[in-house]
Image (cartoon, helix red, strand yellow):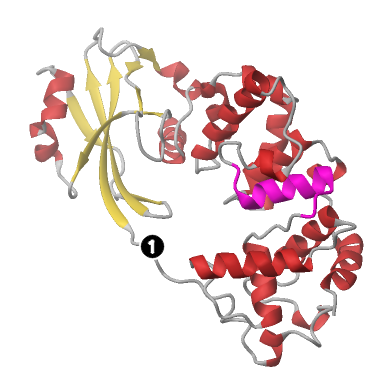
Amino acid sequence: MKLSNYLIPWYLQNKRDLPWRTTTNPYNIWLSEIILQQTRVDQGISYYYKFIENFPTVRDLALASEEEVLKLWQGLGYYSRARNLHFSAQYIVNELQNIFPTSYNELIKLKGVGDYTASAIASICYNEPTAVVDGNVYRVLARYYGICTPINSSKGVKEFKQLAQSLIDTNEPGTYNQAIMEFGATMCKPQSPDCNSCPLNTSCVALSKNQTKELPIKEKKIKIRNRYFNYLVIKTDDNKTMLVKREKGVWLNLYEFLLIETSNLIDENQLIEHSIFNSALKKMSVTLKLFNKEVIVHKLSHQHIHTKFWIVNTPASEDFQIPWETVHKYPVSTLIDNFLNQYKIH
């Protein structure tokens, strides 16, 4: 059975009305694909509109500052996507004379663009028959063909890519790729797939063997690291504070309050004795108050960040020069943004 004979008609009848489906402009498709990495469609739509409004062309994005891009991205997480997006926009404008790459082999050279994104853009925008393999495609293929190879193993990645490539409709590669992804997102869902209405239900191996809950198989590789953050939220007598730009890690180039990271949770006395605390406050007369009575646990894919926000009231100082009313203009992590929203309420 040829999958495209079922999936393309199903897609044309059932596809969601999404803004990037009204165009084949490679900039728009690239932008949508980068946003939708690790992001739900319902969350990504508003960010897509914001980026298109603020940066309608790749040149507009290239001319923006990284800080502007990160601020607009704020709340989406996985900030390396935004940094890579900006870097690649500048590369296209400055090195490629503002000409967007037109093939899979050229697209995959862009920073932040892997096999899936290059395949999506190449097929949708340029009709190149390159198969996409994302989480939705893995799920559809694993269930339909009853494949038990782990999708996050090197063997699995190769096996599923080869299978996907063998199935692509060479006449309508872009439509087929979107069809199989949409099918996985709305019909063959991770939980509670709609098997009764599925046009493939008479030939699906997982359904016939009652394996839809087991497939696809993913090896457990992630080890969660626990980290302990103590943020010093400086508030001076003249209503100023201190923000620091991160120089490494998951929140690279985002701003945060002065951070003391420790190997475990600490109390007020241990905080006051810490060398960073003493170096920053230089024996000033300060009052210290823990803002959150319960430790905030901010969960990322590979780490859990246990956080305390300490409000530090201090005299005016040349070391603390950022007016509180401007803090909201800086790109920050969701952890810091959530604190700022709660702090306003108080």
Q: Quadrant of residue 140?
A: bottom right
Q: Is 270 placed above or below 147 here? A: above
State left or right for residue 329 relative to residue 122: left
Magenta stretch, residue numbers:
113-129
Q: Residue at x 33, y 59 (%)?
A: 224
> Which residue sits furthest front?
105
Say whether residue 328 is left or right of residue 36.
Answer: left
Report if residue 241 is visible in the image.
yes
The x and y percentages for residue 137 are: 68, 65
Q: In the picture, which quadrant includes the N terminus?
A: bottom right
The amino acid type, in three-letter code, at marker 1 is: Ile
How many numbered callouts? 1
Q: Is residue 87 above or below residue 38?
A: above
Name the residue nearer the viewer: 170 or 338: 170
Measuring 65% from the left and 52% from the top, which residue is drawn there? 116
Q: Residue at x 81, y 88 (%)?
A: 202
Location of mark 1 (residue): 222
The residue shown at (59%, 78%) is 215
Image x and y of residue 311, in percent? 27, 30
Secondary structure beneath label 1 = loop
In the displayed structure image, the side of residue 115 where residue 75 appears, left or right: left
Is residue 117 on the magenta stretch? Answer: yes
**Image quadrant occupied by the C terminus:** top left
Q: Is residue 298 above or below residue 345?
A: below
Principal SS element in the magenta part?
helix
Q: Residues within 10 Å of mark 1 (few under 14, many from 20)?
A: few
Question: Where does residue 104 sit, x and y in percent of width and height?
Answer: 71, 45
